[in-house]
Amino acid sequence: MPKIPLAEYIDNAVDWMQEAWGPALDVISETQDNQVSFLTDFLSNTPWWLLIAIIALIAWKANSVKLAVGSAIGLLFIYNLELWGPFIETLVLVIWAAVVAMIIGFPLGILSGKKDGFNTFIMPILDFMQTMPSFVYLIPALLLFGIGKVPAIFATVIFAMPPVIRLTDLGIRQVPTDLIEVGETFGCTTFQMLWKIQLPVAIPTIMTGVNQTMMLALSMVVISAMIGAGGLGAGVLESIAQLKNGQGFEFGIAVVIMAIILDRILQGLGKSMQVDKER
């Protein structure tokens, strides 16, 4: 049985994209790199104690005093390990990639929740994206953008986007029918129905998707150190290559602390929105 030349087809498609979209990709890459570098430099030049205080304040407002104290202790521990620079780099990449994934994913999730035909079309694509091994995303990112932070952001956005699309779709579909009927009775337009009824009710489910997207972005940013993303992932990768167990544990525990802080803050925001909705 003759083999289907799938690899050749993909190589040809990538070559065509590089030739046809090369200038546009260069502009996107340069713009994204400048913006990420500016934000990284800004946070790096911010006094470490002030940044810890700001994050602790956010944790307190979003969740509880307990989380604020725990966040401050965890961040002080990262600073003590002299990993503050890599921590800032990873934090910027995670937040940047997650925000881009949400900007793209929210409209797609809303459209999927309101249009059955689009839902039927996009769900197999999301299944494919979520079952694809994470390392595979690095290949097209590397070919299209080269080595650096931009391909890491590209791969992270693609990898982290499915949860926010799925759970936005689910949240829209779970809105009770009687609420929709009430909105129709009062003559709500499609936008008013979405903005005043469907999205407020769907917020807790949507926030779960935001949480999952953020966690996936963090995991992918660490893996993206293989293509020059830097940050804490680079330290983990170096430790594996040089068999430095202690150094690897230090970088790994910093990643865990970041993940816990982001996760608890987002969970707190979701609960706060749920309480506001019930009121």
Image (spheres, rainbow, N blue to C red):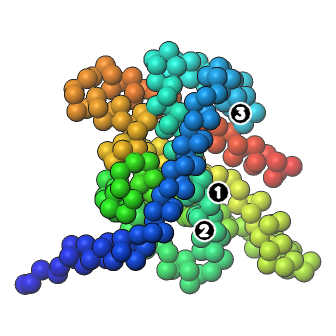
Q: Amino acid at mark 3?
A: Ile
**Residue lying farthest right?**
186
Q: Is residue 224 visible?
A: no
Point out residue 83 in the picture as x, y percentages from the top left corner.
Answer: 46, 24
Q: Which residue is mark 2?
A: 109
Residue 175 bears which disc, if any? none
Residue shown at the point (47%, 43%) measured from the top left: 218
Say which quarter of the image contains residue 117: bottom right
Q: Residue at x 36, y 44 (%)?
A: 228
Residue 15, x across and y down, in percent: 30, 73
Q: Which of disc 3 and disc 1 is earlier in sequence? A: 3
Q: Does residue 118 appear left or right of residue 248 in this picture?
A: right
Q: Disc 3 vs disc 2: which is toward the camera?
A: 3
Mark positioned earlier in the residue sequence (3 or 2): 3
The structure residue drawn at horizontal position 50% and vertical position 15%, both measured from the top left corner, is: 80
- According to the picture, the residue beneath numbered tag 1 turns out to be 206
Q: State which tag comes first along the sequence, 2 or 1.
A: 2
Q: Nearer the viewer, residue 275 or 72?
A: 72
- Amino acid bearing label 2: Gly
Task: For label 2, count other residues whose C-alpha is less than 10 Å away and answer few (under 14), some (14-19) or many (20+).
Answer: many
Q: Secondary structure at mark 2?
A: helix
Q: Residue 266: which quarter of the image?
A: top right
Picture quarter with the N terminus = bottom left
Q: Are marks 2 and 1 in contact (CB under 8 Å)?
A: yes
Q: Secondary structure at mark 1?
A: helix
Q: What residue sits right under mark 3 in the picture?
A: 58
The residue type indicated by label 1 comes to Ile
Q: Position of residue 93 (x, y in %)?
A: 51, 44
Residue 46 visible in the displayed image = yes
Please say if 84 is above or below 96.
above
**Is 43 drawn above or below residue 209 in the view shown?**
above
